[in-house]
Image: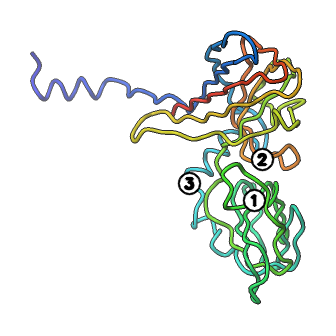
Amino acid sequence: MMTVTQAARAASRRKASVPASVHTCFRTDITPLRGRRRRGRWDSNLATDTASGYTNRRDFQSKAMFAGPSSAFAVSQGNATATTATTLTAPTGFPTSGQGLAGCIVVAGPNASGTGSKVYGVIVSNTATVLTVDQWYDPTSTTGAAGTTPNATASYVVVPGQNPASWIALTADAAAASSADTTLASEQTGSDFKRAVGTYSHTAAASTAVLAHTFTAASTVTLNKYALFGACNTTGGGVMPFESVISSPPPMLSGDTAAVTVTITI
């Protein structure tokens, strides 16, 4: 039996355990229109750690955890001078260093006269005077539906933080996944398999969180890879922090359903 002093010395000589990095696992369960349900196997992800620029998974996580008022986002508010379906222009002088405001959310509302829609957008890039968003979202929607373009002189504020990577994307492309990938090659954009918001669940204090969505095929396609994104469409792009190859690619026929479950371990 060791004394307290001996135990303390022994503990000090042991190397501290290194916590596991954030990772995800994907699973797809297929229910044919006719026939038996096929339960898929879990596929581990490939994190985009070697991608360049703000597409890198580590950049995404850093902003999600630490980017707040100290990053001078609080000064990014005022009234726009012009808007389009994917931009908001203002004379404010948006910060551009360190990937600027990419990944943050801009909320736009009525102008000083009370005219205009209430919407928000995920900033995919910005200059000193122009924010480019993936789209304007309807804040009352739970599926990421588009909202109305805000008034040209809308009030706006950039919210501190990072939009979550809650969009599940699929592709029939059979090429190997790469940690340098920034997009999902030949991503499905049809109405049946286009990007969809995963339903989020998490147990308090647990080390995992889950995103899940069921896709219903309206076409014939073999799904080969999936990924998570921080924006709703391929035009806006958004960060792709995780990508995975499906080990047993499911051939989908019209009417089949694919239940995709993503488990994120922190």
60 left or right of 173 in image: left
Callout 2: SS: loop
Please tell me whether mark 1 sits on a helix, a strand or a loop: loop
**Looking at the image, which residue sits at the far front?**
34
- Residue 36, image quadrant: top right
Count the marks. Answer: 3
Task: Name the residue tied to disc 2.
Answer: 232
Which circle, 1 or 3, is nearer the viewer?
A: 1
For the residue carrying disc 2, how many other residues have a C-alpha within 10 Å: few (<14), some (14-19), or many (20+)?
many
- Going by the numbered disc 1, the residue's amino acid type is Tyr
| Residue bearing the label numbered 1 | 137
- The residue furthest bottom is 113
Q: Secondary structure at mark 3?
A: helix
Q: In the shown orientation, is residue 226 left or right of residue 220?
A: left
Is residue 100 at least partly visible in the picture? no
Q: Is residue 94 above or below residue 216?
A: below
Residues at discs 1 and 2 in contact (Cβ within 8 Å): yes
**Residue named by callout 3:** 66
